[in-house]
Amino acid sequence: MRALLRRDLTLAFRSGGGFGLGLAFFLIVAILVPFAVGPENALLSKIAAGILWLGALLACLLSLDRIFALDWEDGTLDLLATAPVPLEMVCAAKALAHWLTTGLPLTLAAPVLGILLSLPPEGYVWLIASLLLGTPALSVIGTFGAALTVGIKRGGLLLSLLVLPLYVPTLIFGAEVARRGAEGLTVTTPLALMSGVSLAVIAVLPFVSALVLRVNLR
Amino acid sequence: MALAVENLSVARGGLPLLAGVHFRVAAGQALILRGPNGSGKTTLLRSIAGLQKPTSGRVECAEDAIAYAAHSDGLKSNLTVSENLAFWADVFGNDDISPALEGFDLKSLSDRPAHALSAGQKRRLGLARLLVTGRPIWVLDEPTVSLDQTFVAMFADVVKSHLAGGGSALIATHIDLGIEAETLDISVFKTDPTADLGAFDEAFL
């Protein structure tokens, strides 16, 4: 599993690896929103948390179809399935690698972009906390979607359609944590619910992903 | 007995291809599979490697004994030759890739990224992966595609030394490898593609 994680990270940082695609998209969204809604600080600071969460979610979605598609095309997936690593572990490693190259950089970039959207000072801690606890769920659910659509030509569209509804709970609770944090309200309830969603999908979905991968490999 | 296949039936895309396939490969022996294009060689090998469920029958071998190599080599074009091999060695719990590099004359190419390799060089790298798996039964699907005569001979030498070390091999190929081995023409197991598969889960295909 360490080998797979290391290889995926190496590949992501090499040229054409796709690292930075999500980050660049996130950056573009956060920079363009003030142009689109107008330079009104009060309005911007009200919607900043929601915009940042939505941007992070869409940026995550952008790189999902690479998770398994590349390994499927060059035959690596077949060989991994016959290797002495459980496929569940492969799915977990893939999700972790996706989070490390997408979710984590997005979380770290979010406070910088928060300044552009005039996020209130109280909001930063909860924005980072909510992204840190919420984006792992996005990667794990995305890996499940990628496993479902592996082997389908141009499966990206189907993948987005399958994954989007599954992303809704994380988006609702995550954006709610960030919004309440920015307004100085208590965040316990949405934070607990979002963490619950994250923990549940991390515990269950690698097994389900491995199951659908086995079906798709036949 | 390293590998025993009994009464195996396989299907592809919901159509039965082969039925009643049976053969045995002992340790230190190789078996060459022959058959015209589309006769089910790949499907049979995938079933034996465990990538696909046979419609009936059994494959008997020790657990985690099979190393499978197919048409695509599972190489990452952005990684170098040695990085590609080291990854597979790591996955299979080995750490020494130098015998594999030497076996297929890849030493001089070890720092070259895989996208800069020729088709034959890629194939050699894909086959070198077999040596780092450390597994006794090699299941190979057309291993000599895009290899020139020199490297076909080199590949045959690697297989011979693998067999001499107590390993075994099941090879689907159209050319003469110069390995002393039994040959099995799988077209004798050909089955009627219109036969009813019964409860086969074709929803997944």
Image: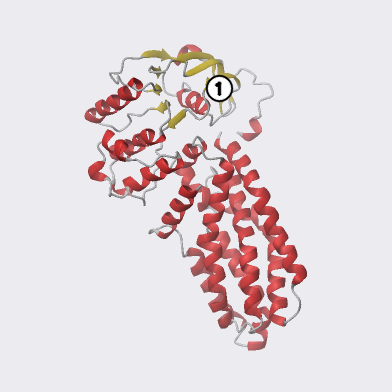
Residue located 52% across and 45% down the image: A153
| Residue in front for this viewpoint, A84 or A150 | A84
Name the residue at 57% across, 82% down.
A115
Residue B152 locus on image (x, y percent): 27, 27
Q: Is residue B47 above or below residue A99?
A: above
Residue nearest the observer in this picture, A194 or A23: A194
Task: Say if B27 sits above or below A177 in the image.
Answer: above
Q: Is residue B75 visible?
A: yes
Q: Residues within 10 Å of mark 1 (few under 14, many from 20)?
A: many
Residue at the image point whose x is 24% and y is 37% from the top: B105
Colour logic? secondary structure
Q: Is residue B104 visible?
A: no
- Provide the chain ID for the residue under circle 1: B
Q: Position of residue A164 (x, y in %)?
A: 66, 58
Question: What residue lies at 58% left-to-right and 79% top-to-bottom?
Answer: A114
Residue A189: x %, y % from top left: 77, 69
